[in-house]
Image (tube, rainbow, N blue to C red):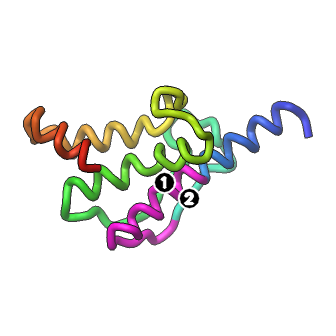
Amino acid sequence: MTLSEQVLERFRRINAVHEAGHAVASLAIGGYANYACVDNENPLAEESFGHVSRAPQNDVENNVIVFLSGMGAEIILRSVSWSLLQPSSGSGDWKNVQRYLRNHTPVERRRIIKQC
């Protein structure tokens, strides 16, 4: 296996763990996940690397937990801190968190993030 193939395989593994993190978190909070999908044809696509089909939770905190759990799974797999994640890691997840929290005051946002 060439070095570029090894890098691509590592990326695919991290991506799969990231999407699995969302699915497991959804199940852990009493929701469900229909399926998790990873883009193995074009894993370096700009838009998205994968997704999990699930029903949104009624609770803002639970949705935030599910959105952030993909990056949390990456941290566990790679044994790194939040600050060492790739800049693109979970960028869509961060946008979803911001969308869910935009109607809350800064104090409420901090409380929700800390509880998650």
Q: Position of residue 100 (x, y in %)?
A: 21, 46
Q: Position of residue 106 (x, y in %)?
A: 12, 32
Residue in the foreground of this view, choosing between 25 and 92: 25
The residue sitting at 42% across, 35% down in the picture is 91
Query: CB of mark 2 within 8 Å of CB of mark 1?
Result: yes
Q: Is residue 42 left or right of residue 4?
A: left
The spot of residue 29 in percent (x, y) is: 33, 67
What is the magenta segment's predominant secondary structure? helix
Q: Is residue 5 magenta?
A: no
Disc 1: CA contacts within 10 A as few (<14), some (14-19) or many (>=20):
some
Magenta span covers which residues?
A: 17-35
Q: Which mark is residue 51?
A: 1
* 83 vs 45: above or below: above
Q: Amino acid at mark 1?
A: His
Task: Give me the disc on residue 37.
Answer: 2
Instruction: Say which residue appears at 41% left-offset and 61% top-offset.
Output: 25
Q: Residues within 10 Å of mark 2 (few under 14, many from 20)?
A: some
Up-down: is 27 above or below 3? below
Q: Quadrant of the N terminus?
A: top right
Amino acid at the residue labelled 2: Cys
Occupied quadrant, residue 44: top right
Q: Report the number of numbered marks.
A: 2
* Mark drawn on residue 40: none
Task: Say whether residue 19 is left or right of residue 107.
Answer: right
The residues bearing labels 2 and 1 have C-alpha atoms spaced at a distance of: 5 Å
Question: Residue at coordinates 37% horizontally, 55% vertically from top-left?
Answer: 66
Give x and y (percent) for residue 89: 50, 35
Q: Residue at x 47, y 46 (%)?
A: 72
Looking at marks 2 and 1 on the same chain, the residue that comes earlier in the sequence is marked by: 2
